[in-house]
Image (cartoon, helix red, strand yellow):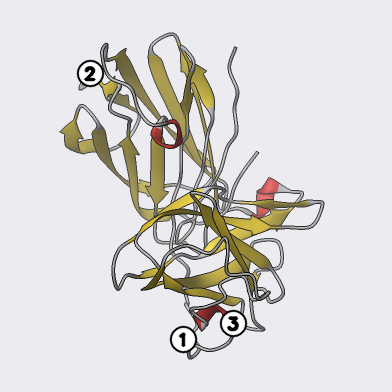
Amino acid sequence: MQKKVNLLKITLMCLWLLVGLNGLGVALALAQEPEPRPPLPPVKGGNDDRGDHHGNGDHDSAPTLGNGRVSGFVYSYSDRAYVGGVKVVISGGGWQAETTTDSNGFYQFGGLGIGRGMLNLRLPPGAFPVVFDWPVQIDDGADLQVDLGYYWQDQSVLPAIASGQISGQNLTLNVKNQTSAALQSSILEITSPVDLELSSAVTVSQGKTEVYSPYQLRFIIGTIEPVTSVTVNVPLKKVSGLSSEPEEAHIRAVFTHDQQKPPADLY
């Protein structure tokens, strides 16, 4: 049985895909970067309160206090604008913090300790994130910038759509430019968990392999013409005797190009 979920990322515009491979969940992501990017507002408000990451006075479930920071902008592809009033959630290992974007579409979490977290948008019915469960590794003094995106109902507002599936021991990814302009400087990167190897016998309809290891592939695709698709096929090999942590047991594919905004998910 296969499960599919597409997701498109921009500045993290990413495209996630969940499919089954002998019980192994697979996630795929596509990336892009927002431009123009508004200047970062000054750090202020509840998220910079090291004693209360929720903004609700509850200190019990907050992560270990530290000086890590995660911030960014939330972009609506349907409205073609950065949007205020959108809830952003970061969570991990028994803790969760929530904030709301300001009038510029900016959010931030401050005072975060060392560890791993997941970013998500909390959206009203009818709105879909371009990316979900986006992982962030917070190190001491980290200042991470992660832009997120969403759309209302119709995927046609997204500049690119990615899809993928695993059939037998073969991973197939398809990236389609659905704009009237060429996507320049297009790059596709694929990483896999420790118990699943990527074969070097890759076929790609356009571009070339720049980086290869059993757990990482990087393709230089270049220009994708309007309403044109690029397909990549990667044979997979299950590695016996190794297993991944549940949260890491997936493949991620990240697509980047020059026409970008913040992260988003496609279904």
The percent coordinates of residue 68 (x first, y second) are 37, 71
Is 252 positioned to the left or the right of 109 in the image?
Answer: left
Work out which residue is located at the far top of the displayed protein and give it. Answer: 168
Of the numbered discs in the image, which one, if any, rests on residue 201?
A: 2
The answer to whether one can see residue 223 in this image is yes
Residue at the (69%, 77%) spot, across then down: 84
Q: How crowded is mark 2: few (under 14 residues within 10 Å), some or many (20 or more)?
A: few
Residue closest to the eye, 59 or 205: 59
Marks 1 and 3, how far apart at CA: 20 Å
Comes first in the chain, label 1 or label 3: 1
Is residue 3 depicted above or below 177 in this figure? above
The residue labelled by disc 3 is 46
Please state which of the two labelled residues, at mark 1 or mark 3, is closer to the viewer.
3
Q: What element carries label 2?
A: loop
Quarter of image, res 232 = top left
Residue at the (40%, 39%) spot, across then down: 253
Q: Is mark 1 on a helix, strand or loop?
A: loop
Comes first in the chain, label 3 or label 2: 3
Please name the amino acid that badge 2 sits on. Answer: Ala
Please name the amino acid that badge 1 sits on. Answer: Pro
Quarter of image, res 98 = bottom right
The percent coordinates of residue 31 (x first, y second) are 43, 52
Quarter of image, res 97 = bottom right
Comes first in the chain, label 2 or label 1: 1
The residue labelled by disc 1 is 39
Residue closest to the eye, 54 or 125: 54
Marks 2 and 1, how far apart at CA: 44 Å
Tally of numbered discs: 3
Please name the amino acid that badge 3 sits on. Answer: Gly
